[in-house]
């Protein structure tokens, strides 16, 4: 019966994605290629002093990204620290400096890692003016970087890759905002709350009393999913009935998470003037996503592990309203898309069931990944794949008419090594440095392999801009607040710097003609190579630590 429900869930999610793939892909392509700026955009450009008709070199594009992120982090940090002075603070004090730093970095990097209980820490002003705003612009930043990389493949003998400010504003105003309005109204119709009410005392089923806040939940919920951000208005995230009231809203949120990432390969194909290229990327993403979901469902359905065996089923920690399939489908989606939202307790998944969730992120979250970050991550893998294939046949590798020389391969290789280096360094320091190790052991809810998995998951989530967590780990201590903040910052912007540098190097080249020896990059063979390279890279880097964590626990 589980597999019947899974098939039904896949059909209910896949149908709207398939129906929207072409029209939304065409619209996004127009958003980033249209020659004219609308009236509102021109006013914004004038206010910020930007010449919207001038394109930027990759260093200038990168400087704009970094300056905008730095300004956003400072503003968000200030809003949290000055919270008691803001309207709608709900009587909450200023956020402590360490947590404010971690949160500012988290939301600016599109991670939305939350080392605090939101409803007890931040009021409405911070939620609206700080967190929700960053949900929009951090997603738009990732989208802009992806489009810049696509331009690198498309442009010929040009030293520019677009204008960041134009891409940012168009992505926000023309794409994310309209979709968020529609999605928000659907969530409200489905029962997600949207108000400015204060705290309300309610009587629980057990006869006790509990105080729950209202708030502008739907407006934040929709962009947290649509922008693959993930931060919840409530500490329970999408398991909270105010955020995710029913199985219908659960499915809607899954669709919102997948909508833009699964549409962007079509945008890539259109901008490259060869839609088949987009289909190959999409096929690789979809096969890895469905494969991961099937494995995760099988592992959870067999109820292996100590907790499920004691409970009699793998439902411990899962939301009864959504059932096993609704919980698994949601969890797979959030780790595949770098969203990080949760509707069930990931720490309660079976020992082996946690492995696919980890692997979804350890692949670099490219199937389909986050808004923008998934596409540029997969294109970097495509560059590596073409290079390996070129070595096998003894030819200079080419992708979309661009030769891939030492510079391009070095940049692509460094880009895919950023995340593993940060994850393994963070986990290693957590257990090797004596003073840090004591702090980590005190924060762990479990010892042994499961404790290692909790720490591995935390650093993996931070390095992939995901934000989900195994809640058996208390990440509110000074080590995790600082270390995870640094990892989020470096993982996001070092990779963006390398991707933009790659885009600039490609844009400077001329387009070489296709010959009989050119590897076709639009068919099933190339899609299969993409999958193989993605899995091999992750396996070579992370297999040792996985054997000490979830695999050791599951096979014990």
Image: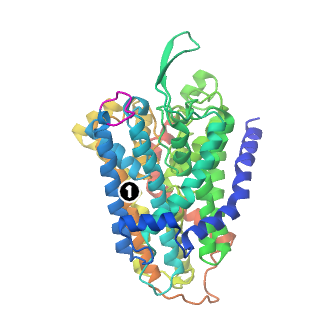
The residue that appears at 46% across and 26% down in the rendered structure is 198
**Circle 1 SS class:** helix
Residue placed at 41% from the left, 83% from the top? 159
Q: Residue furthest left?
A: 435
Quadrant showing the N terminus: top right
Q: How many marks?
A: 1
Residue 529 visible to an observer of this rendering: no
For the residue pair 197 and 280, the one nearer the viewer reads as: 197
Tell me the residue at 35%/57% (across/down). Answer: 69
Please tell me whether residue 33 belongs to the stretch shown in magenta. no
Q: Position of residue 377 (x, y in %)?
A: 50, 63
Q: Quadrant of residue 412?
A: bottom left
Task: Give the vertical position of 104 relative to 96 (above or below).
Answer: below
In the image, residue 298 above or below residue 474? below
Secondary structure character of the magenta stretch overall? loop
Which contiguous range is marked in magenta?
Answer: 86-93
Asked if residue 139 shows in the view, the reply is yes
Q: Would you name the residue on which mark 1 appears? A: 491
Instruction: Using the image as rendered, state which of residue 307 and residue 554 is in the foreground.
Output: 307
| Residue drawn 62% across the image and 47% down it | 183
């Amino acid at each position: 019966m589980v597999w019947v429900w899974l098939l039904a869930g896949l059909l209910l999610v896949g149908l709207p994605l398939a129906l929207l793939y072409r029209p939304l892909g065409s619209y996004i392509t127009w958003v980033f290629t249209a020659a004219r700026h609308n009236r509102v955009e021109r006013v914004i450009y004038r206010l910020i002093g930007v010449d919207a008709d001038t394109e930027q070199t990759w260093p200038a594009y990168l400087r704009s990204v970094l300056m905008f992120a730095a300004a956003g982090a400072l503003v968000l940090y200030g809003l949290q620290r000055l919270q008691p002075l803001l309207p709608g603070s709900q009587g909450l004090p200023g956020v402590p400096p360490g947590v404010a730093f971690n949160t500012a970095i988290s939301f600016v990097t599109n991670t939305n890692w939350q080392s605090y209980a939101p409803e007890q820490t931040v009021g409405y002003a911070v939620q609206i003016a700080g967190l929700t705003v960053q949900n929009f612009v951090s997603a738009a930043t990732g989208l802009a970087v992806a489009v810049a990389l696509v331009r690198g493949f498309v442009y010929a003998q040009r030293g520019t890759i677009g204008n960041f400010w134009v891409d940012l504003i168009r992505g926000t105003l023309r794409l994310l905002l309209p979709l968020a309005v529609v999605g928000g109204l659907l969530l409200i119709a489905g029962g997600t709350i949207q108000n400015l009410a204060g705290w309300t005392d309610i009587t629980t089923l057990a006869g006790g009393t509990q105080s729950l806040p209202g708030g502008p939940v739907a407006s934040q919920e929709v962009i947290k999913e649509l922008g693959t951000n993930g931060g919840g208005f409530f500490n329970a995230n999408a398991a909270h009935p105010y955020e995710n009231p029913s199985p219908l809203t659960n499915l809607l949120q899954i669709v919102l998470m997948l909508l833009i990432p699964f549409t962007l390969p079509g945008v890539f194909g259109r901008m490259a003037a060869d839609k088949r290229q987009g289909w190959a990327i999409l096929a690789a993403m979809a096969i890895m996503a469905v494969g991961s979901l099937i494995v995760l469902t099988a592992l959870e359905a067999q109820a292996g592990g100590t907790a499920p065996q004691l409970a009699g089923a793998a439902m411990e920690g899962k939301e009864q309203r959504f059932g096993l399939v609704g919980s698994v489908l949601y969890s797979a989606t959030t780790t595949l898309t770098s969203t990080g939202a949760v509707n069930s307790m990931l720490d309660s998944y079976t020992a082996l069931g946690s492995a696919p969730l980890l692997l979804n992120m350890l692949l670099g979250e490219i199937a389909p990944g986050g808004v923008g970050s998934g596409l540029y991550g997969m294109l970097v893998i495509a560059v590596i794949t073409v290079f390996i294939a070129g070595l096998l046949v003894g030819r200079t590798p080419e992708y979309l008419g661009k030769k891939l020389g030492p510079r391009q391969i070095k940049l692509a290789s460094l880009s895919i090594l950023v995340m593993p280096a940060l994850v393994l360094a963070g986990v290693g320091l957590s257990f090797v440095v004596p003073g840090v190790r004591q702090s980590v052991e005190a924060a762990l809810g479990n010892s042994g392999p499961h404790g290692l998995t909790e720490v591995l998951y935390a650093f993996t989530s931070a390095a992939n801009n995901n934000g989900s967590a195994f809640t058996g780990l208390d990440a509110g201590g000074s080590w995790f607040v600082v270390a995870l903040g640094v990892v989020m910052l470096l993982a996001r912007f070092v990779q963006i710097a390398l991707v933009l540098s790659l885009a600039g190097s490609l844009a400077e080249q001329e387009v070489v003609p296709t010959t009989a020896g050119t590897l076709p990059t639009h068919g099933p063979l190339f899609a299969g190579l993409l999958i193989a390279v993605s899995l091999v890279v992750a396996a070579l880097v992370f297999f040792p630590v996985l054997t000490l964590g979830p695999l050791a626990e599951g096979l014990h």
